[in-house]
Amino acid sequence: MIKVLAYTTASVFLLALIGAVSADRAVEPNTQHPLLPAWAPTHNAPIPQAIPSNHPTTMPDPASAQLIGTALNLYHTDQLDLYHDALEQMSKAGFNAVQIVTPIFQSDGSAEQVGPEHGPGRGPSMEDIASLLSHAKQLGMTTMLMPQINFTNPRGNEWRGKLQPEHWAPWWQSYNQTIDLFLDTAIDSKVDIFVVGCELLTTHKPEHQARWQQLIAHCRQRFPGQLIYSTTWDTYHKVAFWDHLDAVGVSGYWDITTLAQDPEHPTPVELKQRWLEIKHRLLAYADTQNKPVLLTEVGYPSLPWALKNPWNYINTDHSAPDHDAQALGYAAFIAAWSNTIHPTQAPGKHTPNTPGTPGTPSPNNTHSMGVFFHKWDPYHHGGPTDTGYGIAGKPAYRLLANWLR
């Protein structure tokens, strides 16, 4: 077990930090697939132009619309009331935004069909999604809707980043139609930010760029809010269509022990320095794209390896929970980002990001749109068996709540 610090040392650091931050992928021709939507790209379709610099939803004003939210994953919504309760709790903690993550399914990486599935153990109905989005709006929270592909029968260790259907055109047809379904809900629910794709790494190849650009252009025609794509911390520089989107969306599961003299026992200063290094590189890259950064996921499971492999929540060896490791990850993030991401006002006391509101950022003045922490768990609230990403009932909650207030 990687034990980051002795309990007393960790506790002292966390309490001190609480006070400190309170102050301081050739595209197949359409003729092969006549059922493709009319707006899907053909092999000779013109490439949509990047969004104009004066597009009203290109960037929010960083001074008034920075987002600090949590993800609410709608994977097991048999008890929908728990998710509504979670929104209330998130609001009370001071979060001004919520990321509604809803699953869409395909059988494995070779499948050519993808779409929503409703029912126990699958995903929520569109009505359930809309009810949660409405509730969040009533609480004064900015809303993001993220459909996310999951495999029902994965082969080995494959995941959505390893998509490789035998024929891509029918997969794109199915994906486009699915995105349109969720876009309907996003429009009806006045969602602020819509995620057109999440961690679909094999589609970053050049032969898929026309597909992405056409899909984004279609969404732009329909949806008045902001559009983003979310990729992984190690692939954001491989995405070639950022100029068609409103932000560089990145899930942030970096190893933050790499600067430690003893990676088994990193110090708080070393963890903060690693997050500062990450931040500087990320903001410098976003500056080349003239886009703000939106950290779409930052989180740490309550497990001993949380700081080294925060993406890994599978506890195969039945390790005991390590809430201190989770808290140290959040503490290092806050320490490194608190002069870039500024908690503003509690939900209900601020004006949420309004679709269509003009932003007037200075040219080349890259900034952060904010962060969504992963995640709020409606079912687990700390204790001796909770090894998950949830923060309720754990030291990380106090850290974040104090920062937000």
Image: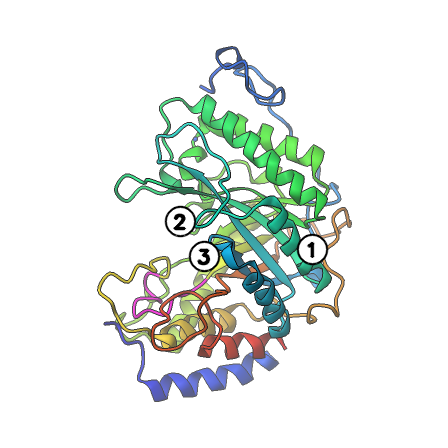
Please state which amino acid type lies under the numbered disc 2. Asp
Which label sits in the foreground, 3 or 1? 1
Which label sits in the foreground, 3 or 2? 3
Query: Which residue is under mark 2?
Result: 234
Q: Real-space Cα distance between discs 2 and 1?
A: 34 Å
Residue at the spot x=39%, y=77% of the render?
383
Q: Say what secondary structure mark 1 lies in.
A: helix
- Judge whether 380 appears above or below 209 on screen: below
- Judge whether 142 appears above or below 259 on screen: above
Task: Compare marks 2 and 1 and give the one earlier in the sequence.
Answer: 1
Q: Real-space Cα distance between discs 3 and 2?
A: 9 Å
- Judge whether 372 appears above or below 33 on screen: below
- Magenta segment's dominant SS is loop
Quadrant in the picture for residue 68: bottom right
Task: Compare marks 3 and 2 and give the one earlier in the sequence.
Answer: 2
| Label pair 3/1, CB-CB below 8 angstroms | no
Q: Say what secondary structure mark 3 lies in.
A: loop
Q: Nearer the viewer, residue 89 or 1?
A: 89
Q: Which residues are magenta?
A: 299-309
Quadrant of the image containing the N terminus:
bottom left
Query: Which residue is under mark 3?
Result: 252
Q: Tell whether position 232 is magenta.
A: no
Please state which amino acid type lies under the numbered disc 3. Gly
Viewed as shown, does residue 79 lie left or right of 273?
Answer: right
Report x, y in % for residue 291: 61, 48
Q: Nearer the viewer, residue 379 or 156?
A: 379
Asked whether residue 342 appears in the rendered view, the answer is no
Query: Which residue is under mark 1?
Result: 134
Disc tally is 3
Which label sits in the foreground, 2 or 1? 1
Q: Tell whether position 303 is magenta.
A: yes
Residue at the spot x=39%, y=58% of the render?
254
